Image: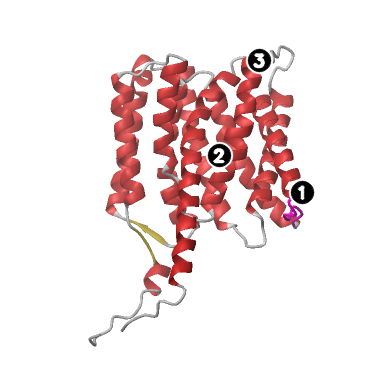
Amino acid sequence: MVLPVTGQSVMTESQRQHRFAVFLAFGLVYFFWGSTYLAIDIAVEKIPPALMCGTRFLIAGVFMLAFCGLRGKRIAYSPRQFGEMAAVGILLLVGGNLTLSYAEKHVASGLAALIIAVTPLWFLVLDSLLLGDHHISRRGKAGLALGVAGLVVLLWPQLRATASFGHTELWSSISLLGGSFSWALGSVLAKKWKSPEVDPFSATAWEMIAAGAANLLFALGVEDLSHIHWTTRGVSAIVYLVVCGSWIGYTAYIWLLGHVPTSKVSTYAYVNPVVAVFLGWLVLHERIDAYILAGSAVVIASVILVTSAQVTTKAALDQLPAVETTGD
């Protein structure tokens, strides 16, 4: 049977534009988020982490919301929708980003990025629990196991250096695992709660505003704000985080969540460490030893296994077409 070709060129052009948008969004997330590890490391040298995060996200969110309003995009939502945006923002930008900012006071930016690279493993587990009746293949399970092995290699120098529970660098590294779980949970919920009624850009703005306010409240309640040094170096890092990390990178990430499977979106987690390790070595002269090289190779291999694994669902099986027994 020959299919009609009417509209084929239009569809091809539409697909080409969509493909370009996807590639561009991935490129923005890969590079700018890889560089934010370095910027966060610089920003928290003199500025408390929660204050830095709160300032960053509140400024980014308010300006983005104003921009959306000027462009005529929807900015008012129902209480339930506002609640979902706030929950996603807090999981991503407090549970995920604030944890990272605190950890980078004790952990090198490159190592932090490598530990965060386990995020796709959380994605696989949470996808199966929250987005349907998924079955994780043997390949996916092998990737999960390999990821744990890679983390052991990365953290082995710290595990070997102390048998106590007070080693700051070790516990900061472990906290990054909790932060990566929070980030994955927020991302999966953002996809689960996606609605055609919600503009993704204004939703992103509200998420950043909610997270910025939560971070500032945390800063007021916990951090010592009496000895703050707003250095040119620190402020420049915050400006970079606002523009490149929040406005550009975070918006591209939220857009990708609405157009690409989360398992593919999560590939940023094994590209960002490459950028972060290189910039940390180039700018901050951070060490790159055999454990980091070996551990990063194992973690990246595990993530590739996970993201390339087949994940089947009952719904997908139910939607398979019946097998035809007749010829063409």
Q: Mark 1 near mark 2, Cβ–Cβ under 8 Å?
A: no
- Identity, as a three-letter code, of the amino acid under mark 1: Leu
Q: Sequence-wise, which precedes: disc 3 or disc 2?
A: 3
Q: Position of residue 154 (x, y in %)?
A: 35, 26
> Residue at the spot x=70%, y=39% of the render?
61
> Residue at the spot x=44%, y=77% of the render?
6
Q: Can you tell which of label 3 and label 1 is closer to the viewer?
A: 1
Q: Is residue 55 above or below residue 180?
A: above
> Residue at the spot x=68%, y=44% of the render?
205
Q: Which residue, given by chain and number where applicable, does mark 1 sit on?
A: 70
Secondary structure type for disc 1: helix
Q: Which residue, given by chain and number where applicable, does mark 2 sit on?
A: 249
Q: Name the one closer to the observer, 70 or 257.
A: 70
Q: Is residue 215 left or right of residue 135?
A: right
Q: Is residue 218 magenta?
A: no
Q: Position of residue 19 (x, y in %)?
A: 45, 54
Q: Which residue, given by chain and number where applicable, does mark 3 sit on?
A: 232
Q: Quadrant of the C terminus?
A: bottom left
Q: Is residue 71 magenta?
A: yes
Q: Name the one closer to the observer, 215 or 323.
A: 323
- Identity, as a three-letter code, of the amino acid under mark 3: Thr
Question: Local crowd at mark 3 within 10 Å, few (<14), some, or many (≥20)?
Answer: few
Q: Is residue 92 above or below residue 224?
A: below
Q: Sequence-wise, which precedes: disc 1 or disc 2?
A: 1
What main secondary structure does the magenta stretch of the protein show? Answer: loop
- Identity, as a three-letter code, of the amino acid under mark 2: Gly
Q: Name the one closer to the observer, 32 or 205.
A: 32
